[in-house]
Amino acid sequence: MTKRVLIVEDEIFVALEIEQIVQQSGLDVIAIAADREEALAVASLCDIALVDLNLRDGPTGPGIGMELASRHDVRVIYVTANPDQIGAASDTAIGFVTKPFGPHCIAAALKQAIAEECDPEESRTDGFTPFLAARDAWRGGESIH
C-alpha cells in the first residue's frame, strides 16, 4: 500500500515543491494544510506528515506534530529553517529537514519514514537530521510513537 503524506506548510510555493518531491518518491499527497485546524481535519487519513513550525496560525507546528504522532500514529518530519524551535516535539518525530532544502533531503526523510527498521546514522544527509528517540525506537524494534 502506498503511504499517504500530509504537508503542513503555509507558504504555497514551498508546499507545492514538497508535493512534487513526495510524488516523485512514489507516495501520495492527501492534503496540504496551512494551519492546525486544516492539518487535524485530515490527520486520520495520513501515514506521514511533513510539518513546518511557523504556520498561518502562528508557531503551532510542534504541537501539531506531537498531536499527529501521539493521537493518530503519524510519522512526523519537521521541515524548518529554525530547528531549535522544535523542542520537546522532537520526542515524537523522526527528524527534521532544514530549509532551504534540496529534493534529496526530503527524499531521505521520507525513506526513513517508510522504513520499518533502519540505522538513522546511515540516513543522515546534508539537510536531514534524524532524532535520537527515533534511533532508539528503531534499534529496539518498537514503534516510534
Image (spheres, rainbow, N blue to C red):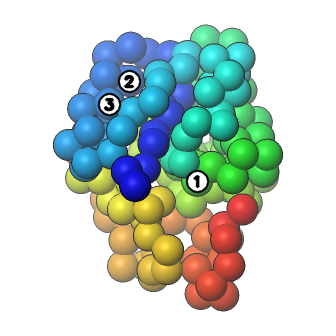
Amino acid on which disc 3 is placed: Glu
Residue linked to disc 1? 75
115 left or right of 91?
Answer: left
Using a 10 Å C-alpha cutoff, classify the residue at mark 2 as few (fewer than 14 neighbours), some (14 to 19) or many (20 or more): some
The spot of residue 58 in percent (x, y) is 69, 17
Give SS at disc 3. helix
Residue 89 visible in the picture: no
Name the residue furthest front.
Answer: 1
123 left or right of 9?
Answer: left
Using a 10 Å C-alpha cutoff, classify the residue at mark 3 as few (fewer than 14 neighbours), some (14 to 19) or many (20 or more): many
Name the residue located 55 percent from the left edge and 16 percent from the top edge: 34
Name the residue located 47 percent from the left edge and 60 percent from the top edge: 113
90 left or right of 12?
Answer: right
Amino acid on which disc 2 is placed: Ala
Residue 8 visible in the picture: yes
The spot of residue 21 in percent (x, y) is 25, 39
Name the residue furthest bottom.
Answer: 140
Name the residue located 68 percent from the left edge and 79 percent from the top edge: 142
Residue linked to disc 3? 19
Q: CA distance from mark 3 to mark 2?
A: 6 Å
The image quadrant where one finds the C terminus is: bottom right
- Identify which residue, 83 or 73, lies in the foreground: 73
Residue linked to disc 2? 15
12 left or right of 94?
Answer: left
Q: Are marks 3 and 2 in contact (CB under 8 Å)?
A: yes
Name the residue located 68 percent from the left edge and 22 percent from the top edge: 41
Give SS at disc 1. strand
Against 26, is 8 above or below? above
Give SS at disc 2. helix
Q: CA distance from mark 1 to mark 3?
A: 17 Å
